[in-house]
Amino acid sequence: MNSPIGIFDSGIGGLTVANAIRQVLPKESLVYFGDTAHMPYGDKSAEAIKYYSLKIGKFLQEQGCKAIVIACNTASSLGYQDLKDFLGNQLPILNVIDPVVDYCTHQPNYKKIGVIATKATIKSEVYARKLKEILPLVNVQSLATPLLAPMIEEGFFENNISKTIINTYLSNSKLKKIDAIILACTHYPLIRKEINDYFKGKVDILNTAAIVAEDVKLKLTKLGLLNNSSEKPKHQFFVSDKTSGFESSTRLFFGDKINLIQKNIWDNKF
């Protein structure tokens, strides 16, 4: 119960999920791995993403994690099942897609749902497929928005550059008259306000990080894995490639200054 929760993403965007988990589960220790050497995952092959997911999952298991959260939509869509098959009988594997789909299925007013994400996530059609399985009448419109993640990584938001890029994407005809929009990339919560401004508050902007965090809390509660220790939680943050830019950006994603540890896991055999 007192072991840490493992979280990984293609970069530092998954820190938005880590921060949300920290808010709802303040007693839990976290071990985060950002695969900054291979980011973005959005333009990588499915086989590459599966391989990265298995390697990182094994690393987090070796750190003694009691559960692993794939805080990356691309890895959740392409690497989740492989990682679950690989480690699922040893510890729970959670993703960021299923909780959001489940949330949408309990919103009867959602007739048309927009999805914005990386090219790989959109190409997988995972959100449309899963939503249609449960809500066959819902209209799901998916749009690849590949410039958003690198834009956010570079700190370009809440300025004229981000407004131009965001408005260009959101003005796409696919997203007309939507009731809700799924921010299907862990970077996107940082531009949630700008997206809401574009839609003038008339569209539900799903806070995917918060939805996932509540799901993690529910799953760990059911499994009897919540931390009951009175000790202060200890967090560790690993990246596969470290730059000063990532270090300075982490405060934006996690809400606090954190120390990034560079870790090469690729030379290790399974």
Image (tube, grey):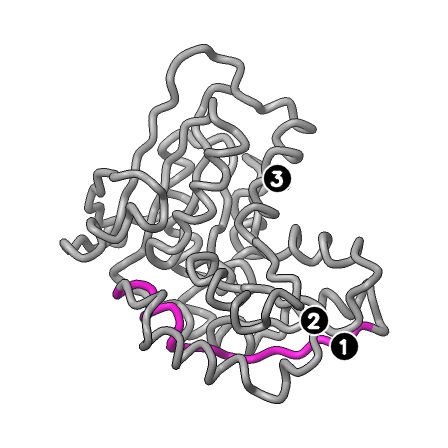
Query: Exactly how many numbered labels are in the figure?
Result: 3
Q: Residue at x 42, y 72 (%)?
A: 42
Q: Name which of mark 3 and mark 1 comes first in the sequence.
A: 1
Give the CA separation, mark 1 to mark 2: 6 Å
Left or right of 200, for residue 9: left
Q: Residue at x 52, y 29 (%)?
A: 25
User: Residue 177 placed where, x, y %?
Assistant: 70, 79
Q: Which residue is mark 1?
A: 139
Q: Which residues are magenta?
A: 138-154
Q: Foreground residue, 106 or 39?
A: 106
User: Residue 95 placed where, x, y %?
Assistant: 57, 51
Q: Residue at x 66, y 67 (%)?
A: 203
Give above or below for 82 relative to 138: above
Residue at far bottom of view: 173
Q: Foreground residue, 206 or 134?
A: 206
Contact? badges 1 and 2 (CB < 8 Å) = yes
Q: Counting other residues with Cα less than 10 Å from the Cα at mark 1, is it few (<14), some (14-19), or many (20 or more)?
A: some
Type of amino acid at the residue the image marks with label 1: Asn
Q: Counting other residues with Cα less than 10 Å from the Cα at mark 3, is it few (<14), some (14-19), or many (20 or more)?
A: some
Q: Residue at x 30, y 38 (%)?
A: 256
Contact? badges 3 and 1 (CB < 8 Å) = no
Give the CA separation, mark 3 to mark 1: 26 Å
Residue at far top of view: 230
On residue 113, the disc is 2
Give above or below for 173 relative to 113: below
For residue 139, which quarter of the picture?
bottom right
What SS does tag 3 mark?
Answer: helix
Left or right of 156, for residue 247: left
Type of amino acid at the residue the image marks with label 3: Glu
What SS does tag 2 mark?
Answer: strand
On residue 214, the disc is 3
